[in-house]
Image: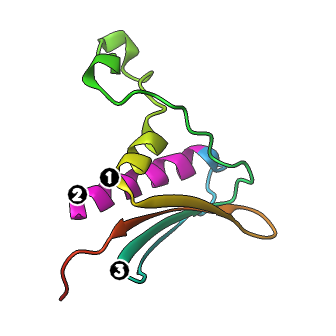
């Protein structure tokens, strides 16, 4: 579960950074819910994330050097593939939390 949580959090943070203005704060939340680990990232942008539906396969990944920075758009598909559920919560006066939940495994 930890590798999945790290991947999800990394994708959500990358999206929040991309959506934010320079020097704007983003917030990261990790918490325990009823049988799940909740991950969330807040940014001040009002626009909802727009998932680009892509087939997750090595064949659809263009690894040519000239396309190194053109392989984006996978983030929310990765989050949806790893999470039990994901959602967006708008905040006032601006911004949103983009969240995902993983099934909690084991106990301390």
- 103 or 64: which is nearer to us? 103
Residue 26 visible in image = no
- 86 or 71: which is nearer to us? 86
Colouring chosen for the image of the structure: rainbow
* Residue 20 coordinates in the image, percent (x, y): 63, 50
Q: Residue at x 45, y 28 (%)?
A: 54
* Residue 95 coordinates in the image, percent (x, y): 71, 61
Quarter placement of the N terminus: bottom left
For disc 3, the marked residue is: 35
Q: Is residue 108 magenta?
A: no
For disc 2, the marked residue is: 3
> Is 9 drawn above or below residue 60 in the view shown?
below
Q: Which mark is residue 47?
A: none
Mark 3 surroundings within 10 Å by alpha-carbon count, few (fewer than 14), some (14 through 19), many (20 or more)? few
Q: Earlier in the sequence, mark 3 or mark 1?
A: 1
- At mark 2, the secondary structure is helix
Left or right, 41 with respect to 37, comes to right
For disc 1, the marked residue is: 7
Mark 2 surroundings within 10 Å by alpha-carbon count, few (fewer than 14), some (14 through 19), many (20 or more)? few
Q: Which residues are magenta?
A: 1-18
Q: How far is the residue under mark 1 from the one under mark 2?
A: 6 Å
Q: Is residue 9 magenta?
A: yes
Q: Earlier in the sequence, mark 3 or mark 2?
A: 2
Q: Residue at x 29, y 75 (%)?
A: 104
Quarter-of-image position of residue 68: top left
Q: Are marks 1 and 2 in contact (CB under 8 Å)?
A: yes
Mark 1 surroundings within 10 Å by alpha-carbon count, few (fewer than 14), some (14 through 19), many (20 or more)? some
Quarter placement of the C terminus: bottom left
Which residue is outermost to the bottom?
108
Residue 55 visible in image = yes
Q: Given this view, does label 3 or label 1 mark the residue nearer the observer? A: 3
């Amino acid at each position: 579960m930890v590798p999945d949580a790290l991947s999800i959090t990394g994708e959500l943070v990358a999206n929040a950074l991309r959506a934010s203005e320079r020097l704007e704060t983003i917030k990261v939340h990790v918490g325990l819910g009823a049988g799940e680990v909740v991950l969330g990232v807040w940014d001040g942008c009002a626009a909802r994330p727009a998932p680009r539906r892509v087939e997750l396969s090595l064949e659809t990944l263009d690894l040519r050097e000239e396309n190194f920075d053109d392989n984006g758009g996978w983030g929310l598909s990765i989050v949806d593939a790893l999470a039990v559920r994901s959602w967006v919560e708008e905040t006032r006066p601006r911004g949103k939390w983009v969240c995902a939940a993983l099934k909690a495994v084991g106990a301390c």
